[in-house]
Image (cartoon, helix red, strand yellow):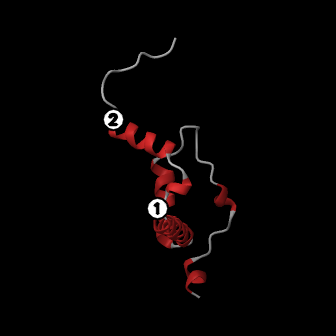
Amino acid sequence: MPAAKSSAPPSLTQEIAAFVAGARLADVPAAVLHHAKRSFLDGLGLALAGSVSEGGHLLRDYLLAVAPSRAGGCTEPASARPRPSRKDRLA
């Protein structure tokens, strides 16, 4: 049985979701697309840099210790990769 429709006005989240779902790439201004692409690449670069920094490893180790997955442990594809020593990274 389908859920009953609410007469309450849509929430802000619902309004944003409807806007995004109805948006077309052709409607996005070129400057906005350019900024979005640069932001995505910036985030990717930060993720890559953080993956080899000492702080990134400390954060990963901490999160694995305090928040293992609900499936009974964390599966981490990068864990098979050897982690360079601090001395090797500074060389």
Determine which of the numbered discs, if any, sits on residue 11 in the image: 2
Query: Helix, strand, or loop for circle 2?
Result: loop
At 48% from the left edge and 67% from the top edge, which residue is drawn? 39
Percent from the top left, x then y, of residue 44?
55, 67
- Is residue 14 toward the left or the right of residue 77 in the image? left
Which residue is painted at 51% across and 59% down in the image? 60
Estimate the spatial distance between the alpha carbons at disc 1 and disc 2, rounded to whole Å: 35 Å
In the picture as drawn, the residue positioned furthest to the left comes out as 8
**Label 1 crowding class (10 Å Cα cut-off): few <14, some 14-19, many 20+?**
few
Question: What amino acid is at disc 1?
Answer: Leu
Q: Residue furthest front?
A: 27
SS at mark 1 in the image:
helix
* Dot 1 and dot 2 residues touching (CB under 8 Å): no
Residue 65 placed where, x, y %?
Answer: 48, 51
Residue 12 percent coordinates (x, y)? 33, 40
Work out whether 89 lies above or below 54: below
Left or right of 49 on screen, residue 11: left
Residue 11, relative to residue 31: is it above or below?
A: above
Q: Which mark is residue 59?
A: 1
The crowding category of the residue bearing disc 2, from other C-alpha atoms within 10 Å (few below 14, some 14 to 19, many at least 20), is: few
Disc nearer the start of the sequence (1/2): 2
Q: Residue at x 68, y 65 (%)?
A: 81
Residue, far right? 80
